[in-house]
Amino acid sequence: MHDSDETAVPESDPGLCDLCGGFIPSDLQIFSLVPDSSVIHPDDPGQDGQRLLAACSPEHLAELQQQYRQRPYVNEELWSGKIARALRAHPEGLDEEQLVHATGLNFIQIEHTLSWESERFLCHQIGEGEDEGHPDAQPDARPDAQPDAFPSGRPDGHGEDRTGPDDGAGGGWREGGYGGGDGGGP
């Protein structure tokens, strides 16, 4: 994914420069789309992983683009957001096939995401404080970070087990954790 300069103004209200925070009239704003694995659009999966930057000058836009070029793009972070969006849309839960359909991910991507989430959780629990995918950021330190698909439940006894697929008893993936046939844990 590449940075792209946009000359069209998406809104008519004055906006804020994403670098300096200054107000800028809509006819002077400069826009760019940059890759950012933490961005999940609430409704349009086609816009996932792309951040719209607004700047008051070409210099500020160039600085913003450089900052995002230095930030790693972590597929598992993007996939985690897709899973979280699907689970929010289906609070009753999803079995593995439904989760694949709702997210557009495959089984391997979902498993990689679970491993990535577990690793982040364990690193946070032992106090490392830094996420391997984003060495410059604490987990969820960015103000726009999406909530984790699996924020607290882990198979280590510190919450509900959210790592398993449908157990065949009518359970499956749900935002509150992995649900067995009785709506509880595995």
Image (cartoon, helix red, strand yellow):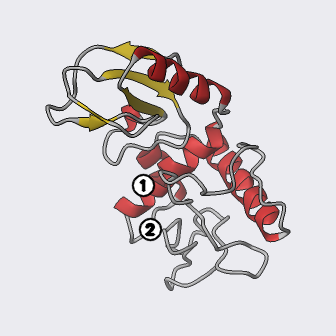
The residue tagged with tag 1: helix, strand or loop?
helix
Number of the label disc, if any, that sits on residue 28:
none
| Quarter of the figure with the C terminus | bottom right
Q: Position of residue 119 (x, y in %)?
A: 78, 57
Q: Residue at horizontal 74%, vertical 73%?
A: 155
Q: Nearer the viewer, residue 19 or 79?
A: 19
Give above or below for 178 relative to 31.
Answer: below
Q: What is the tally of numbered marks visible in this picture? A: 2
Q: Position of residue 173 (x, y in %)?
A: 53, 65
Residues packed near mark 2 inside 10 Å, few (<14), some (14 to 19) or many (20 plus): many
Quarter holding residue 24? top left
- Is residue 169 left or right of 24 when viewed as pictured? right
Residue type, mark 1 in image: Ala
Give above or below for 96 relative to 70.
Answer: below
Nearer the observer: mark 1 or 2; the answer is 1
Name the residue at the left extreme.
12
Q: Residue at horizontal 47%, vertical 51%?
A: 144
Q: Nearer the viewer, residue 134 or 7?
A: 7
Discs 1, 2 touching: Cβ within 8 Å: no
Q: Residue at horizontal 44%, vertical 61%?
A: 87
Q: Position of residue 114 (x, y in %)?
A: 68, 55
Residue type, mark 2 in image: Gly
The residue tagged with tag 2: helix, strand or loop?
loop
Quarter holding residue 9? top left
- Which residue lies under the disc numbered 1? 86
- Is residue 137 left or right of 144 when viewed as pictured? right
Q: Residue at horizontal 35%, vertical 60%?
A: 89
Residues packed near mark 1 inside 10 Å, few (<14), some (14 to 19) or many (20 plus): many
Tag 2 or tag 1, which sits nearer the N-term? 1
- Which residue lies under the disc numbered 2? 93
Q: CA distance from mark 1 to mark 2?
A: 9 Å
